[in-house]
Image (cartoon, helix red, strand yellow):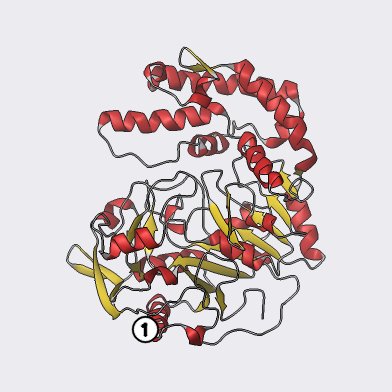
Amino acid sequence: MTNSNSAVVPGRNVVVVGTQWGDEGKGKLVDWLTETATGVVRFQGGHNAGHTLVINGVKTALHLIPSGIMRPGVKCYIGNGVVLSVGKLFEEIAGLEKAGVDVRSRLRVSEACPLILPFHAAIDIAREAAKEKAGTAKIGTTGRGIGPAYEDKIARRALRVQDLKYPDRFASKLRDLLDLHNHVLTTYLGSAAMVWDEKIATYMKDGAIQFEPVFDEAMAQAELLRPMIADVSRELNRAHVEGANLLFEGAQGTLLDIDHGTYPFVTSSNCVAGNAAAGAGVGPGMLHYVLGITKAYCTRVGGGPFPTELAWEEEGTPGWHMATVGAEKGVTTGRSRRCGWFDAALLKRSAQVNGLSGLCITKLDVLDGLSELKLCTGYELDGEFIDILPMGAEDISRCKPIYETLPGWSDSSVGVTQYDELPENARRYLQRIQETTGVPIHVVSTSPDRDHTILLHHPYHA
């Protein structure tokens, strides 16, 4: 493997997806790739996602706005596949503008985005609390209303961004939704007896969400949002015809995909590369290259099976090392991430459902100092060996990982930008990942900083 120096192809579009359970470092790579891209598109999820960027030592956390916003001149699009909390969007805009980032002139929001409203978060929190009270396994949601908002979309009753432009229409649909969701809250989930967070409480009376505060807030937000509302599908297709290089940014990770993940411990949208087309309003022929982002080990936030998970409580153990050196805390929730060895069988599943063109390995530097590493090549399931992650949480929870042991390295890889300058055993480890997953490694990240990146093949190059 050698560093890349081929030429950029104009009009080439790239999809960036997480290949594990999210938190793989997609934000840094999207930001880095915007040196070439002219537009960045978010195509699924909501503000349950979190992308951390470190530029010149300054950390920025994004949840809804595409990571390209940190690169001056790059246009950013929120596609129809995103469920949108307008309030959270403006909180994010305010933070960026305070830091001197121009947002409003560069951001376009699809008029077809379903809206996340206060009752969605209320239902999300109530359901998890009900599971906990009943002693059943919680899904591990962020409690931000993402799942209930997608349910309204699929049931064809959602309020969408375009409804904000028509107050009477918005009010009529809102009343219908409140009748339904307040019935669930007060009768089925018994929300009146629950303790809500401070924000949700401002919309509630006797356990039910009230019409007036939700409507008034939405109408105030509508006036601010109006200049950014657009036919994103049309704008993207026009940009493509004009030769723009577009970057499609996924949220979460493949193993949280509603169809292909560790169901039911998943998110409520399709996180795989194919959804970039449906979630942005472009044809699949416009997606030319798929870059899969994967940590050099594995992490997971929330509930659900995790075959290679390690204990992390004891200082000096590999799990403790990953959690501590890797600063493994969720960007959105602050929850500690569970850590474990790299799982090649899991990545084979991700490669299959995403059609990966290449891999970006992140956080290689976190493994500096470990004397030996283990790499999962498959599992024992019901007495048989399988070399790919099975479908669904029930079978995955019964998988016993089968490991190869590889030598670690003591030299630092932090900030290395040339492949040949990596420690020898680090290169061997990467080579083995490439061999066991069947996907070529095209990029390696050696710290959170934008510039600490080893380029072996550029996604926008031929």
Q: Residue at x 58, y 30 (%)?
A: 117
Is 163 left, or right, of 267 in this rendering?
right
Is 161 left, or right, of 238 in this rendering?
left
Q: Toward which corner of the image does residue 391 lie, by quadrant? A: bottom left
Q: Which amino acid type is shown beneath numbered disc 1? A: Asn
Q: Residue 364 at what x, y percent from top left?
A: 43, 71
Q: Nearer the viewer, residue 39 or 162?
A: 39
Q: Residue at x 29, y 59 (%)?
A: 309
Is 157 left, or right, of 122 in this rendering?
right
Q: Which residue is mark 1?
A: 425
Q: Residue furthest front?
A: 57
Q: Residue at x 31, y 57 (%)?
A: 306
Is 336 left, or right, of 45 in this rendering?
left
Mark 1 nearby-residue class (10 Å; few <14, some 14–19, many ≥20): some
Q: Residue furthest right?
A: 242
Relative to 457, say whether 305 is above or below. above
Q: Residue 16 at what x, y percent from top left?
A: 57, 63
Q: Residue at x 58, y 58 (%)?
A: 53
